[in-house]
Image (spheres, helix red, strand yellow):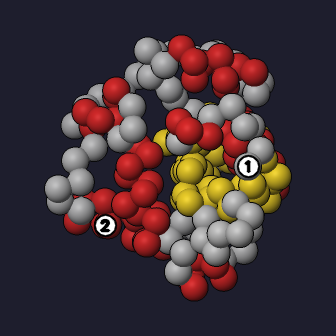
């Protein structure tokens, strides 16, 4: 953990089995681990290619520079360890809109929790925190998309109160 990472304010701290989970803003030093998390499943493995880091670095810089976007990571801090291991991530974006009487909405993307710590409540805690932050920033709606093949993710989000009220569509450019 760099001094920059250590000095960032915790967005959320949670006691979990095996240690303490700490959610904080991501730093550029976290980028390789974030990409590992994004690629650590059947779909992500086919989408991510870290042989050229330049596109990821540009994307990180754009996200980091814009206050309408937050890239967060979660660390698992275990007793006796000086540094935490990044075990989770998500991106939260805040979007203005004309619909819903000109209300803002948030969009949560790329929610990932490392396989070895799933089931500890980390994912639910992160999404709950993101919903609270969205309310704090005046959003009236929080939205996400998840691949149709991710049935476990669908059940997870439904348990948290999300409804599959719309059919999402994407156009690859």
Classed neighbour count for the residue bearing mark 2: other residues with Cα under 10 Å, few (<14), some (14–19), many (≥20): few
Q: Is residue 12 in view?
A: no
Q: Which residue is mark 1?
A: 18
Query: Could you tell me which quadrant the C terminus lies in?
Result: top left
Most extreme residue toward the front is 80
161 with respect to 47 (left or right): right
Query: Could you tell me which quadrant the N terminus lies in?
Result: bottom right
Q: Nearer the viewer, residue 151 or 91?
A: 151
Give the percent coordinates (x, y) of residue 16.
78, 47
* Placement of 132 over or under 27, stated as above or below: above
- Which residue is at 57% across, 49% downward? 88
Give the percent coordinates (x, y) of residue 89.
55, 50
Secondary structure under the numbered disc 1 in the rendered image = loop
Q: Quadrant of residue 144?
A: top right
Q: Which residue is mark 2?
A: 58
Q: Quadrant of residue 117?
A: top right
Most extreme residue toward the left is 51
Disc number lying in front (2 or 1): 1
- Which residue is at 65% across, 56% downward? 76
């Amino acid at each position: 953990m760099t001094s920059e990472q250590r000095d960032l304010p915790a967005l959320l701290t949670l006691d979990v089995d095996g240690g303490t989970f700490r959610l904080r803003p991501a730093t550029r030093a976290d980028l390789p681990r974030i990409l590992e998390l994004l690629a650590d499943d059947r779909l992500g493995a086919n989408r991510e290619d870290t042989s050229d880091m330049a596109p990821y670095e540009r994307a990180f810089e754009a996200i980091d520079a814009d206050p309408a976007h937050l890239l967060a990571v979660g660390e698992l801090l275990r007793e006796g360890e000086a540094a935490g291991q990044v075990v989770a991530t998500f991106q939260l974006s805040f979007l203005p809109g004309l619909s819903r009487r000109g209300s803002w909405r948030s969009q949560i993307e790329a929610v990932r929790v490392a396989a070895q710590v799933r089931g500890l409540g980390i994912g639910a805690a992160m999404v709950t925190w993101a919903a609270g932050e969205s309310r704090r920033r005046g959003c009236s709606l929080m939205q996400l998309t998840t691949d149709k093949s991710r049935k476990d993710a669908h059940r997870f989000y439904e348990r948290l109160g999300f409804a599959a009220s719309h059919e999402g569509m994407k156009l690859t450019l």
